[in-house]
Image: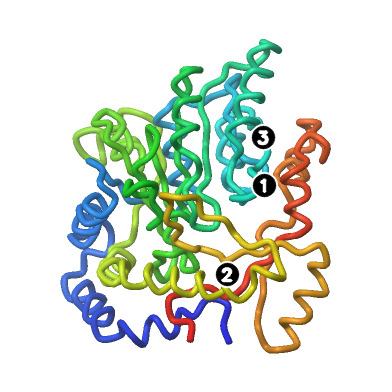
Amino acid sequence: MKFIDLESQYIHLKDKIDQRIQDVLNHGQYIMGPEVKELEQKLAEYVGVKHVITCANGTDALTLAMMVLDVKDGDAVFCPTFTFFATAEVIAYEGATPVFVDSDADTFNICPQNLELQIQKVIAEGKLNPKAIIAVDLFGLPANYPEIEKIAEEYDLKLIEDAAQGFGGSINGKRAGSFGDIATTSFFPAKPLGCYGDGGAVFTNNDKYAELLRSYRVHGKGKDKYDNVRIGMNSRLDTIQAAILLEKLAVFPTELEARNNAAEKYTSELKSKYKVPLVPEGYVSSWAQYTLQADNRDSEMAHYRAKGVPTMVYYGTCMHNQTAFTYLGYNDEDFPVSSRIAKAVFSLPMHAYLR
C-alpha cells in the first residue's frame, strides 16, 4: 500500500483534471491566468475570509506574511519547536529571532501555557522586541486559537496561522485559514489539498495586508509590474497548478469526510495499544497525518514494514536541535514534551482513498 495515494486520487478525477489542464494549454496564460483568480475566490469562500493571495509555495506564504508584518532584526517571533523547519526558517530569514515553545502533550500543537511563559521570559530579558506568534496546525488539527488569540491580544502580538497541514480543519465551525491576523497554507502534493508541484496561499481579512501581499508576491509592484514601489519577491502560483487545485477543491469536502472516517477506524482499532491522537470537542482535523506514539517506535515501525504498511516519522528532530539553530543555546530540558514526542511519534498511511 502507499503512504499517500495520489495515483488513486488522480484516477478518480482524471477526466476533470485533464480537461482543466487542456483549457490552460489552449488559452496559454501560464502565469497568473484566469484559473488563479477563480481559485483565490473559491478558497476565500471555502475558508470564510475576505482575501486569498496565492503564491509559489507554503514557505513563500510564510515569508510574505513576515514581510507584511515587517518582522525584522531585533524582533522575537514565537513558534513551536515541534514542527517542520520552514516555520522557524522564515523568521530567521528576516533577521528576527525564533523563540521556541513546547508542545501540548495530547494534540502535538503549540502549548498556550508555555507560549505565555516564553513571552514573559523575552519581556523580562529585554533584549528582543516581542513581535508575533506563528501557530502551526500540526497533522491537520487546528491549534488552540481560542487561548492563543487571547495571549496575542494581551501582549499585543500579531498572530500567524500556519495552516499548511490544517487546511480543512475547524474549531466550532470556523475553518483553518481564518484564524489570526494572517494565515498561510501549502499545496505541496502530500498536503490535504495538494497540487502536482509546489503552491501556497495567504489568507486575511485585512485590506491593507492583502494589498501589500499582492505587491510583494510580484517584485513589489505598484500600478503594474514595471512600477516597483517596494522590494518584493517572485512568488506566483502557476496557472496549471491552480487549474488542478480547482478540481481537487471541488471534491475536498468528500475527501475530508473519508479522511475522518479512516482516522476513526484507526483510533477504534489502535487505542488499546498506542497513545492515539486527540481531537478536542468542537474541533475537526483534516488528518494531514495520523500519528501514534510508542516508546519502542523502531520496532513498531519494523512490524508494520514487515506487513507491507509504510510508516513515516514527523518530526524526529525538533527545531531547537537543528544545527542551524544551535546558536540559540536551547536543550531538550527546555522543551520536555516536544523532546519526548519527537522520540515516540510515527505516522500511518492517511489519504481519502484508503480501503
Point out the frontmost of discs 3 and 2: 2
Q: Does residue 11 appear to the left or right of 208 in the view shown?
A: right
**Kind of residue sitting beneath label 1:** Ala
Quarter in which the N terminus is drawn: bottom right
Mark 1 crowdedness (10 Å alpha carbons): few <14, some 14-19, many ≥20: some
Q: Secondary structure at mark 2?
A: helix
**Kind of residue sitting beneath label 3:** Phe
Mark 3 and mark 2 lie on one chain; the one further toward the N terminus is 3
Location of mark 2 (residue) = 267
Report the disc number at residue 100: 3
Q: Secondary structure at mark 1?
A: loop
Label 3, label 2: how far apart the Cα atoms are: 30 Å
Q: Residue at x 21, y 39 (%)?
A: 224
Residue 211, how many percent across, how many down?
Answer: 26, 33
Q: Does residue 29 appear to the left or right of 315 in the view shown?
A: left
Report the disc number at residue 105: 1
Residue 161, how many percent across, how many down?
Answer: 45, 41
Label 1, label 2: how far apart the Cα atoms are: 17 Å
Q: Secondary structure at mark 3?
A: strand
Please tell me whether residue 234 is drawn above or below residue 278 in the rendered image.
Answer: above
